[in-house]
Image (cartoon, rainbow, N blue to C red):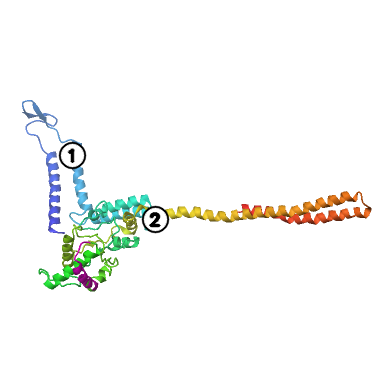
Amino acid sequence: MTAVSIFIAAVTILHILGYIGLVYWTTHIKAGGDAKEGEVIDHTWDGDLKEMNNPMPGWWLSLFYLMIAFAIAYLFLYPGVYKGSKGWTQLTQYQQESRRVDARSAEYFRHYAGKSVEDLAKDTDALAIGRRIFLQNCAVCHASDAGGTPGNYPNLSDKDWIWGGTPENIINTITNGHTGAMPAGGALISVTPGQAPSAEDQQKLEDVSNYILALGGYEHDQALAEKGEELYSTSCVACHGPDGKGNPVIGGINLADQTWLYAEDSEDPAALKTFIQNQIQHPRNNVMPAWKDILGEAKIKVVAAYVYSLSQDESEVDNSAEEEKTATPVAAGEAEKPAAETTATAAEAAATTSAAEKPAAETTATAAEAATTTSAAEKPAAEAVPSAAESVQPASETAKPAEAATPASSEAATAP
């Protein structure tokens, strides 16, 4: 126990003993004079206010006893005089409550575990939860609208990302955090704390800063920018890339746009050039803390979906959904083609059948004329009629296969 703990325990014990003494004393006070219990004491106040010789009410006295018993039990059960028999501490209570809350939230977030960040970015419920997590934990630096703090913390609602803006990059940044790693002077100049750069180093700063202004489309000195390009290619390209568009793997920022994290005035070329030179000499390296032990994997995934959705156009977020909607009608149209082609084939078969029946009908008419002629002819000629009738039969039989083809074609036309 520390000295403070001993002092507090001593004061507490003395107060309890004082209460016990007070109760004992008040219950054993004897009224002065000859007044007996229940009688009026022989003195008054203000001429008519009298006091009776009665003990303290039992219910009131019981409250004192209960408070004394509670104080003694409290000192026995909880830390005070010693660690307490329950072993309770504020830390253990916090941990128990945290585990209870984490268990409930884990059950709730299990619904989103199997979904990708892209899918969660289209889920209105998930986005609402992600926004609440963001407001509770991230808004203090990145602002409630995720627009960041100019000159201090980055904007999360645009498409300019230092460590990458893919779902995987965002999850990794939130989970493990990042620390800026811009060295003082970089590989361009040597910096001595408290000393101004030499004339040679100052000229290098002028050249490189003009080249960086040129990359971003700002007004610049072209002659100095050409010299700065050579210095850039040997001193800065490793982190910021040959085209100045940065390297998200190591947090090399994009120098070829007009988005600046620490520059509060990025529209004035002169002020921006001064800022660039100061940043090279005395870089600011912010720290993004790791949240894996605070939020956990499930919450990080949901808040990452919210942050990801902020930098995406509505058309981009809904693009996959539109593709799914348009894919079904196209497939259905393709499926209808074979059925239509089959129907056309059936129609052609029916036409062929009609054409096949036509010769048979002509043959029958010829046979009928032959039969009429037979009635005026001799018997041998009449015997030719059956032969003519027999010649009609093959033609009719020939028509049958064509007729049989029509139902089959109809079935093909109605097939799914």
- For disc 2, the marked residue is 119
Q: Are marks 2 and 1 in contact (CB under 8 Å)?
A: no
The picture places residue 375, in percent across and down from the top left corner, at: 91, 49
Q: CA–CA distance between discs 2 and 1?
A: 68 Å
**Residue 241 at x, y percent in the picture:** 27, 69
Circle 1 is placed at which residue position?
61
Q: Assign the magenta stretch its main secondary structure.
A: helix
Amino acid type of the residue tagged 2 in the rendering: Asp
The residue shown at (17%, 71%) is 204
The label nearer to you, 2 versus 1, is 2
Mark 2 / mark 1, whichever is N-terminal: 1
Residue plotted at (20% across, 40% down)? 63
Q: Residue furthest top?
A: 48
* Neighbourhood count class around disc 2 (C-alpha, 10 Å): few under 14, some 14–19, many 20 upward: some
Q: Nearer the viewer, residue 110 or 40?
A: 110
- The secondary element bearing badge 2 is classed as helix
